[in-house]
Image (cartoon, grey):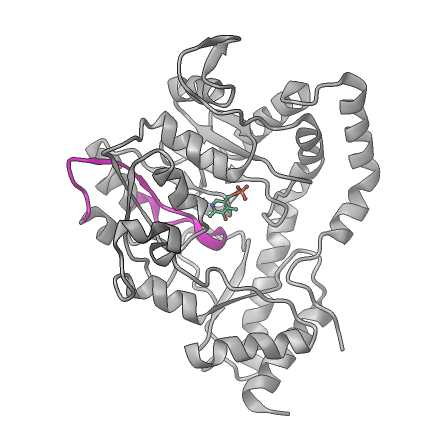
Amino acid sequence: MMNVPLLDLREQNAKLRPEIEAALGRVLDTNAFILGDEVAALESELADYCDSRFAIGCASGSDALLLAMMAAGVGPGDEVITTPYSFFATVSSITRLGATPVLTDIDPDTYNLDAALAAEKITSRTKAVQPVHLFGQCAGMDVFLELFGERGIPVIEDAAQAIGAEDKERRAGSMGAIGCFSFYPSKNLGGMGDGGFITTNDEGLAEMLRALRVHGSKERYFHKWVGLNSRLDGFQGAVLRVKLPHLDAWSDLRKQNAERYRLLFAEKGLNEHVSAPNERPDGRHIYNQFVVRVAEDVRDRLRAFLAENGVGTDIYYPVPLHLQECFAFLGYSAGDLPEAERASRETLALPVYPELRTEQQEYVVDKIAEFFHGN
Ligand SMILES: *Cc1c(COP(=O)(O)O)cnc(C)c1O
């Protein structure tokens, strides 16, 4: 039996180990453990990479979203339109501020928030809209910018899974008012612990975000706002600067792996059973996850069969956010957002990380074929 984990970072880290150790040593030597020169240098490299004027490091992707909502002035009585088919923090960043998330169904082809449905939910209380570039593919931003941005409603991009992804040659995080990113180790650019950052082209917002991450103070001990303690550590900054120059190559390898899955599915006659992800035209998908769709009555059995055969998979996301216990007070019921609910019953993420070997991928597809066709 071959072992194919969903994600394996050991090879990537082993190759970079001497550089990572040297970078950590620089932080030890300077004692710049919170923010500091490494983080400042990383922020400027990230701003370049994301085609944004400013990049601001913070403690996690979840905090990036919370800080973005705070900077957009989201508070009690406000509504933010977003997707139920995402990671928890997409919606908790709204409810934590006492605002109401208005959850709207997804486009089943891309799993991203459906812009036209979202626009139907605009009211006088709509303070922002938050599309998520899910699995590494940008939501079609022109429609969001037209339906929301041009009406004065800021578009906040949850780009936690989409660093370097593009929509018509525009980078994720550079199109809306604010972009939010995560360095959680499973993202395409992962740290060695928690971390995140925020992008914006607006100088005033950048200044406010820089203050909000240090308890709302521009000058120490003078507080203009009630912010958070949410800074990026020097160690994370140093490690991420070693990794950033490799990010494009890693994302390209993920894309190659995605292409290979498509070929192998066709070769093995699996296209009637397994739907590979759809790519939008004029985009760059960075395949943070390679998520397939299968019939709902086989998904869990397929997952168990793959696990028995050493293949790691995961379900993003088994319970859509409108049906989470903690959001019961929002008053949604099963059946309200049918595409998100169907996606949560039909999708399965397969290994797609850059170091995945061709033999491993062939093995994964052989096992899927064995499941559907028998030996
Ligand atoms: C990972 C992720 C986050 C949160 O990032 P953390 O760094 O884990 O807090 C937010 N939104 C989405 C879509 C994510 O995938």
Q: Which residue is drawn at 35% across and 62% down?
A: 340
- In the image, is residue 294 above or below residue 34? below
Can the viewer see residue 168 in this picture? no
* Residue 79 pos. (x, y %): 25, 39
- In the image, is residue 129 above or below residue 364? above
Assess whether residue 140 is covered by the magenta stretch.
Answer: yes
Compare residues 36 and 143 and report the one nearer the observer. Answer: 36
Q: Which residue is drawn at 54% across and 27% down?
A: 230
* Residue 6 pos. (x, y %): 64, 62
Compare residues 313 and 261 and report the one nearer the observer. Answer: 313
In the image, 100: left or right of 241? left
Q: Which residue is drawn at 67% across and 32% down?
A: 236
Q: Residue at x 84, y 38 (%)?
A: 18
In the image, 308: left or right of 90? right
Assess whether residue 284 is covered by the magenta stretch.
Answer: no
* Residue 338 pos. (x, y %): 29, 66
In the image, 174: left or right of 116? right
On the rendered image, what quadrant is the N terminus found in?
bottom right
Residue extending furthest left?
Answer: 124
* Residue 136 pos. (x, y %): 49, 51
In the image, 82: left or right of 254? left
- In the image, is residue 266 above or below residue 83? below
Which quadrant of the structure image shows residue 374? bottom right
Which quadrant of the structure image shows residue 352? bottom right
On the rendered image, what quadrant is the C terminus found in?
bottom right
Can the viewer see residue 87 in this picture? yes
Magenta segment boundaries in residue numbering = 121-142
Exactly how many numbered labels are in the figure?
0
